Image (cartoon, rainbow, N blue to C red):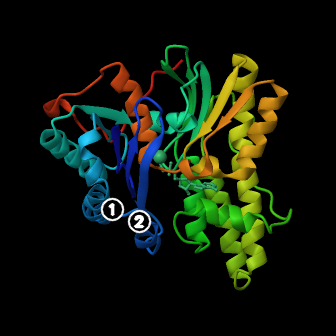
Amino acid sequence: MILGIESSCDDSSVALLDIKSLKLIYHKKISQDEQHSKFGGVVPELAARLHTAALPKLLEEIRPNFKDIKAIAVTNEPGLTVSLVGGVSMAKALSISLNVPLIAVNHLIGHIYSLFLESEARFPLGVMLVSGGHTMILDIDEKGDIKLLASTMDDSFGESFDKVAKMLDLGYPGGAEVEKAAKNGKERFSFTVPLLGDPRMAYSFSGLKNQVRVEIEKLKESGNLSEQDISDICYAFENAACKHIMNKLEKVFKERKFKRFGVVGGASANLNLRSRIENLCSKFECELLLAPLKFCSDNAAMIARAGREKYLKKEFVKFSELKINPRIKFDEA
Ligand code: KG4
Ligand code: ZN
């Protein structure tokens, strides 16, 4: 088995994956949402402290499987440095005590493998990655080489949901809460879709967030925010954010003619976005791949799965060479 460890942000997670059958033997995650919720976002120092308590607890549960572990795959980039340290330190200590090799896994590549958790990977593949830290369109060739087609210039898609949720006191993480509120929303506000006439292949969510802020302030000046006000704001914001994603994505589809396209990352759980991408794929006769909802957000199963590919190629990393990178860059196409 491959042991997967994930601690790049605010989820501590451990998984065991069978190398041959790709069966997930064990998977658990301890989320820190509640502890960060009152701050309206992740507090790095708190996240680090919670990881050091949660990771050993999870490890204790799989102690009987230690003898079957052939390698340890751990997220080493990108993410919060103080959070990554927790998982990487535990992986290093275990690799010494169990005498098994280490595999360094890029968290974003982990998200891509959430599409192939219990099946062999299929490339070439176009990917829309929407998470709390990233918004990217990627083109992956037959060999698995990744090229960046578009990314955000400021906030990410998921982060903009978190910020709108914070302005409306909906808690953290805000994505699911904003989506829930938007379901009862009506056509009332109209926010400008970012970079609509702009030829750049890029995303930007900070202007949209400011439009929402101004509208909330206006509503607050005229009294308390009602539940319907909140729903209507969320409805208009979610639609503008999704239209922004789709506007650039459709341009890419016209150019690239993808055979297969996947949507990954925590925010890929958004059903409004999913159905828009579903329609785009059917218009362009492209196969759509989606991760199971449970594995859209950060988890160690996807890290073990990405690690298994490296295990087959014997891409191990020496103890002293396993480094943490808070930021990474993919080559542009
Ligand atoms: O991939 P992920 O778990 O963590 C990072 O790698 O960043 O993504 C978390 C992000 C958060 O910003 C969260 O608000 C967003 O995904 N998210 C959503 C939804 N569910 C989670 N955003 C929009 N709609 C959702 N339903
Ligand atoms: Zn993630």
Distance from the alpha carbon under mark 2 to that under mark 1: 7 Å
The label number, if any, that marks residue 175 in the structure image: none
Q: Position of residue 154 (x, y in %)?
A: 52, 44
Looking at mark 2, is its residue's CB closer than 8 Å to ligand 1? no
Q: Nearer the viewer, residue 53 or 15?
A: 15
Q: Is residue 263 left or right of residue 10?
A: right
Q: Nearer the viewer, residue 209 or 8?
A: 8
Residue located 60% across and 43% down the image: 204
Residue in the image at 54% along x and 26% along y: 120
* Depth order, front residue of 309/11: 309
Q: Is residue 168 left or right of residue 57?
A: right
Q: In which quadrant of the rendered view does residue 164 lie? A: bottom right
Which residue position holds label 2?
32
Q: Is residue 213 above or below residue 300?
A: below
- Contact, mark 2 vs mark 1 (Cβ under 8 Å): yes
Disc 1 marks a residue whose amino acid type is Ala
**Can you see residue 192?**
no
Q: Is residue 148 left or right of residue 258?
A: left
- Pointer 1 local density, CA inside 10 Å: few below 14, some 14–19, many at least 20: many
Label placed on residue 47: 1
Label 2: state its secondary structure: loop
Decide which of tag 2 and tag 1 comes sooner along the chain: 2
Give the amino acid type for the residue marked by disc 2 in the picture.
Gln
Total marks shown come to 2
Q: Secondary structure at mark 1?
A: helix
Residue 108 appears anywhere in the view:
yes
* Residue 194, percent from left and from top: 69, 44
Check the picture and name the quadrant holding the N terminus: top left
Q: Residues within 10 Å of mark 2 (few under 14, many from 20)?
A: some
Q: In this rendering, is residue 133 above or below 108? A: below
Q: Position of residue 100 (x, y in %)?
A: 20, 34
